[in-house]
Image (cartoon, helix red, strand yellow):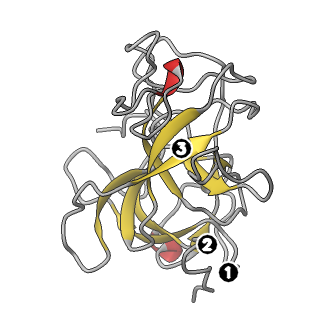
């Protein structure tokens, strides 16, 4: 059976020590002036300037190939469970877009208000990600190697469930310490056929802001 071609970014599955992932995350802000589109499963990195909102929440932007990564978006919207009393960021607000609760993504282009994201930023979390790219389909020789992700084709809006188009770029496998991800293993489920197109891999963030990248064998 062929693997389903349905990239969905990075999906947390467990910790490096084998324990199941507990859903933990931290709040970050995507500033209104940011022009990227953001979806669930997108990798993000902290920004170097204007690096927080007025309440001291750290700001992130979309991570790209070779960036150090802070974490992965799990939820996103204009709601903010903080102390601001402005209409777009009511105290106790949900991680949802308040004018439209069905909008679970952040559109491309500068916005009228900040968006807030729940980000899995623990460097010990393992993720599932689909392979793609113009390189050869990866084999067992890629296990334990490092690799970049590709943020995929991005549009300002979506018409289906808003998951990230980010995928593991099979044309970037190498030993370089600054590559985004480290390949741990092929996903071991009946719906994944290893070493064939669109396969799913289990990876960790290799170049993580909290730990720094490492070389691979």
Q: Is residue 61 left or right of residue 16?
A: right
Question: Which residue is labeled 3 in the image?
Answer: 42
Q: Nearer the viewer, residue 147 or 1?
A: 147
Q: Is residue 133 left or right of residue 211?
A: right
* Lower sequence index among marks 1 and 2: 1
Residue visible at 57% across and 89% down? 217
Q: Is residue 89 above or below residue 43?
A: above
Mark nearest the camera among 1 and 2 is 2
Give the numbered dot on residue 207: 2
Secondary structure under tag 2 reads loop
In three-dimensional space, the C-alpha distance between marks 1 and 3, rounded to whole angstroms, equals 21 Å
Q: Is residue 32 left or right of residue 144?
A: right
* Lower sequence index among marks 3 and 2: 3
Quadrant in the rendering for residue 93: top left
Q: Nearer the viewer, residue 15 or 187?
A: 15
* Residue 212 point in image, percent of width and height: 61, 80
* Residue 80 point in image, percent of width and height: 44, 34
Q: Residue furthest right?
A: 49
Secondary structure under tag 1 reads loop
- Label 2: few (<14), some or many (≥20) within 10 Å? many
Q: Is residue 184 above or below residue 56?
A: below
Circles 3 and 2, Cβ within 8 Å, touching? The answer is: no
Give the numbered dot on residue 49: none
Residue visible at 45% across and 72% down? 123
Circles 1 and 2, Cβ within 8 Å, touching? The answer is: yes
* Residue 57 point in image, percent of width and height: 56, 51
Question: Which residue is labeled 1 in the image?
Answer: 177
Secondary structure under tag 3 reads loop
In three-dimensional space, the C-alpha distance between marks 3 and 2, rounded to whole angstroms, equals 15 Å
Residue visible at 48% across and 41% down? 117
* Residue 135 point in image, percent of width and height: 67, 53
Mark nearest the camera among 1 and 3 is 3
């Amino acid at each position: 059976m062929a693997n389903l071609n349905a990239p969905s970014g990075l999906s947390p599955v467990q910790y490096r020590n084998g324990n199941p992932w507990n859903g933990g995350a931290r709040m970050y802000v995507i500033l209104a002036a940011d022009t990227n589109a953001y979806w669930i499963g997108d990798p993000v990195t902290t920004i170097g300037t204007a690096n927080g909102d007025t309440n001291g929440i750290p700001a992130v932007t979309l991570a790209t190939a070779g960036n150090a990564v802070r974490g992965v978006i799990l939820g996103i919207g204009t709601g903010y469970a903080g102390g601001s009393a402005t209409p777009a960021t009511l105290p106790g607000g949900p991680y949802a877009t308040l004018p439209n609760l069905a909008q679970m993504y952040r559109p491309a282009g500068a916005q009228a208000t900040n968006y807030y994201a729940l980000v899995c930023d623990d460097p010990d979390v393992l993720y599932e990600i689909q392979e793609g790219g113009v390189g050869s389909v990866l084999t067992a020789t890629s296990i334990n190697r490092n690799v970049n992700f590709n943020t995929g084709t991005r549009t300002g809006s979506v018409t289906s469930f808003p998951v990230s188009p980010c995928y593991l770029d099979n044309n970037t496998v190498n030993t370089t310490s600054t590559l985004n991800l480290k390949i741990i293993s092929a996903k071991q489920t009946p719906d994944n056929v290893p070493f064939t197109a669109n396969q799913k891999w289990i990876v960790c963030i290799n170049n993580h802001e909290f730990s720094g990248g490492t070389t691979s064998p």
